[in-house]
Image: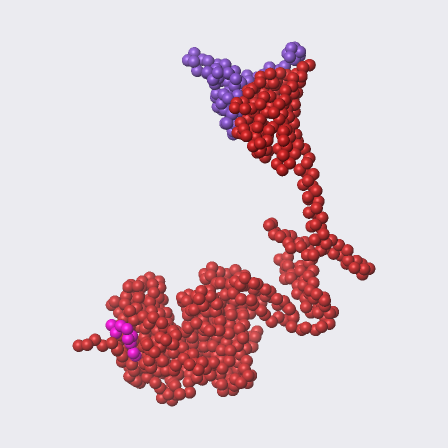
Amino acid sequence: MPARTTWNTAFDIHRVADDGSLGANVLLAYWGNSTTNPDYAALSGYGRSELVGTPGAHQFIIRMPIPGANMLGTGTMPTPYGPSAYSEYLNSAPLFALKGSVDNVLFYWGTLGKLPTNGRILPEIQNVAVVTNPGVTSDAIRFLEFHVALYANPNYHPTKLGATAQIAIRPLDANAVAIGSPEVVIRAGSYQQFTGRAKSPGDYVLADLPPGLRTSFDVYKVDDNGSLGAIVESGSWGNSTLDESHAAVAVVGKSDLVGKPGALEFVVRAPVPGAGMVGTAVADLIQTPNYGSTINSPPKFAFIASATGVEFYWGTLDRPLEDNAQTPEIQSLPVVAYPGVTSAATSIELHFALYAQSGYSDSLLGATAEIAVRALDADGVAIGVSEVVYRDGSYEQFTGDEKSPGDLVLVSMPRTMGSHTASHSVLSCHTLEVHRRLILSNDDDASDAAYQHVANKATFEISDGASRNGHSGFMSAYHNGTRPQVELTGDVTFAADSTITLPRGLFHENANGSGSTGLDVSQLLSTISELTATVNDLKSRAPVYVNLRWVNNQTGIIYTDDKIQFKWDGSNHQLMFLALDIREEEILTGGVSVWRGGDEKRTNSYIISGSITEVFAYFTDPVTSSVNHNPEFDLKNWFTRALYYITPYYDYDDDPFPSYEITVLTGHSNHNRSFSIRRIN
Amino acid sequence: MANRWVIFHNNEIRFWTEDEQFANFTDVPFPDEECDILMNIPNFDGTQGVRLIVDESGNKIPELYDYPLPTPEMIREN
């Protein structure tokens, strides 16, 4: 029998009866299975789901075998997104595909009811991540059960029956015993997308979603190349408590409106009431500040519609707005009708990208959200996109998951952030860009100088930490009508190793208006340079004295400079020298005169040639092939004075060797010698 | 602390140094056989005298002593 390469899994769709049991069979439907590995075709027929489905819903369950160890699906769809993958792997009937890793299995299904052209970017392919639960290893999972309950989605499409699916995926082991804890998620699409059978509006009357549902969505990290990266976690939004039929749904895929590399991003889509934009889900909860009883800790959305636009609300109310806590726990964003765009919008998408917001709270992870809203018509065609706006808050406020600082590492916002300001504004700017700017300005460009002096002024204030009123102006920047001005109040301290770039000069305007007096920096530098040259010249010519005392019978180096070393010969009590840097053709002359009692003994001569180096020599005799010691000049007696000198014979102008004169004084012969060394350059 | 070598001639200190390049007999105008060199003699700080005492076994033991203060007579004799 030839192997089949394409399988369709048939399954029955049942209506859930009023008592919650499995009711009548509504339809026989099919799911297309993976074309790459029919061994993992789906199975069906498991009765009433205990995970999803309330009375009036359409429900079914199918079960998929998965490859087991490491959860590497042989039915992996290699490119789950992108037009090139659709035609090869998916057609009008739903197909499933798995994409596994050591951490999770991504479960894909979808149809290709419409080509992704003409701006129609409905997420026909959807997915859910099945994350390994604590204590459940990936090796243990052999099946995934797909529980689906279908409810009404009245605004999906004019000619296609829309459905909002309540989905739970449950891992099973090899004995088909459930392991792990499934999470219920919500996805919106066409009825065909979930069942493989095309239906038009009116073919079925679907029940509304039951109250209390929350919308689950996946929070992704944006990769370095800007594409959608790994799932970081799943978040959830509480939906409007007043009209559950307008529950938000998660939108799968990379946002094309927000999200730079390193950001965490997600997209949710909320239906709006359609014609007239008169919101049937209008909530009285948005009449701030009286929203206390209607919004609680998980984020909820609500909207209020009018003839000119929709205002979209979300937020949490973890903490009462007391104690000067000015954090806007409830936030809003107006979606204004755009030129040429009528009230035809039937849904809006909120695109969130989350970045670091340091200092939000000691116990709550802060986030700055980059948000854009796109309005869609009944065909899912974008009919307007809002500008990108920014909101600060807790991470929980945007995702419903409370986090502490350190639970997640958020990158700083990689862009310059602007903000419309009122009379006062607090700005926080995080950026990865090389060029960082913080611009404070008013929009009123009145030309009157006096007005600009006041209006175009920004002040940095420093708090003393004592109270909210304990601020003091530190730096003010303003425009005086002619040029920008900066005023500093208080002390200015420069950090170690900091530098300052000097202005052209330091000037003081004369009181009588007769110009200014002051210091021109370039002239100052020129003067300093001339003085430095003079000082260096004087320094080079001035004799240098070194005075020291030395134990009489200690042998050692008593003096070293760049040209010479002097050694005291503690054995014979004579001074010796070693030329360190001398031209080979130079000759050093020198000698010694010793006063001892009433006698004076002298000698001098040329004493060494520059061709002879690396030898300590006495001042008394020429050094040729050996060093001669003349004991007549040993300074072993009491109260003597000796005067040594050494000076170059040729004294080359381009490389002179210094002259030295050394006086040695002796009191008691067994005690110290006093040396005075004078260098003459 | 730096090493300190003491060079002896006929068991009496000739000179001392803390510079190893001079810790030899080059500057001593006597036969090497008459000289000795010891390193790091305990309590010798360079200001005292030191001599070598030969014990019964022939070992040379350093002995420190203070230089005598000069007397007027000694000065006049100079």
Q: Position of residue A625 (x, y in %)?
A: 52, 24
Outermost residue on the bottom side: it is A202
Residue A140 placement: quadrant:
bottom left
Using the image as rendered, state which of residue A280 and residue A532 is in the foreground: A532
Q: Residue at x 63, y 59 (%)?
A: A463
* A125 sits left or right of A69 in the view: right
Residue B71 visible within the image: no
Q: Position of residue A151 (x, y in %)?
A: 38, 81
Q: Is residue A79 above or below residue A410?
A: below
Residue A583 visible within the image: yes
Question: Which quadrant is the N terminus of chain A positioned in?
Answer: bottom left
Shade representing chain A:
red
Q: Position of residue A450 (x, y in %)?
A: 74, 69
* B67 sits left or right of A521 in the view: left
* A281 sits left or right of A460 in the view: left
Q: Position of residue B32 (x, y in %)?
A: 47, 17
Outermost residue on the right side: it is A512
Is residue A221 within the magenta segment? no
Using the image as rendered, state which of residue A217 and residue B62 is in the foreground: B62
Q: Residue at x 74, y 56 (%)?
A: A507
Question: Which quadrant is the C terminus of chain A positioned in?
Answer: top right
Q: Is residue A364 above or below residue A271?
A: above
Q: Residue at x 35, y 70 (%)?
A: A106
Q: Residue at x 54, y 75 (%)?
A: A387
Magenta residues, as a range?
A31-39
Using the image as rendered, state which of residue B49 and residue A403 is in the foreground: B49
Shade representing chain B:
purple
